[in-house]
Amino acid sequence: VFAERTNLAGVRHILLVLSGKGGVGKSTISTELALALRSAGKRVGILDVDLCGPSIPRMLRVQDSAVHQCDSGWVPVFVGQDKAIALMSIGFLLERLDDAVVWRGPKKNALIKQFVTDVAWGDLDFLIVDTPPGTSDEHISIVEALRPYQLLGAILVTTPQ
């Protein structure tokens, strides 16, 4: 619990991006929102918990980056010349970004909890959490892991059909 308090203590607002189905643009919305907030002078992080389809590293052109360790956990990958967007994704932990992640619920849930507790986010105005499609274990895990923190809200991405 101490690590949780420490690593998210500098995060002012947490936003979830979710939908009931795949292919509606959650990762695009998360990425564009982060870029817009950065343009407005905000310090932004993206936590990509779409474990089976981590597309944000590719969208931000940092798919070849690696995650490193520090005293307080994993150091997120910093995006852009100004390094104003911090990003953590399972895509950085795979040998190849296209590798399939075929894990059962407990292993997925453990990684999501580790992403919440063990990433050294530093001071952020916004942490955007990009979730996988649907209403699966991952959603329950992320909400449970973030329960001690004040969520600003959620963005529900839908399509008109």
Image (cartoon, grey):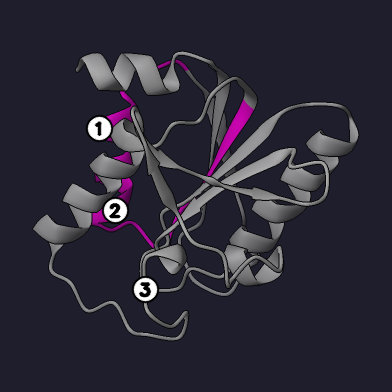
Q: Residues within 10 Å of mark 3 (few under 14, many from 20)?
A: few
Q: CA distance from mark 1 to mark 3?
A: 25 Å
Magenta span of residues: 126-150
Q: CA distance from mark 2 to mark 3?
A: 18 Å
Q: Quadrant of the C terminus?
A: bottom right
Q: Which mark is residue 144?
A: 1
* Mark 3 lies on residue: 94
Q: Is residue 9 visible?
A: yes
Q: Residues within 10 Å of mark 1 (few under 14, many from 20)?
A: few
Compared across the picture, whether 59 is left or right of 22 comes to right
Q: Which mark is residue 138?
A: 2
Q: Which residue: 17% across, 49% down? A: 110
Sequence order check, earlier mark of 1 and 3? 3
Q: Nearer the viewer, residue 23 or 67?
A: 67
Sequence order check, earlier mark of 2 and 1? 2
SS category of the residue bearing label 2: helix
Which of the 4 quarters of the picture holds residue 153?
top right
What amino acid does circle 1 point to?
Glu
Q: Is residue 133 visible?
A: no
User: Is 160 inside the magenta-drawn segment?
Assistant: no
Q: Is residue 30 above or below residue 52?
A: above
Task: Please report contact status of discs 1 and 3: CB closer than 8 Å, yes or no.
Answer: no
What amino acid does circle 2 point to?
Glu
Mark 2 vs mark 3: give the one in front: 3
Mark 1 vs mark 3: give the one in front: 3
Residue 80 in picture, x, y percent from top left: 78, 52
Q: CA distance from mark 2 to mark 1?
A: 10 Å
Number of residue marks? 3
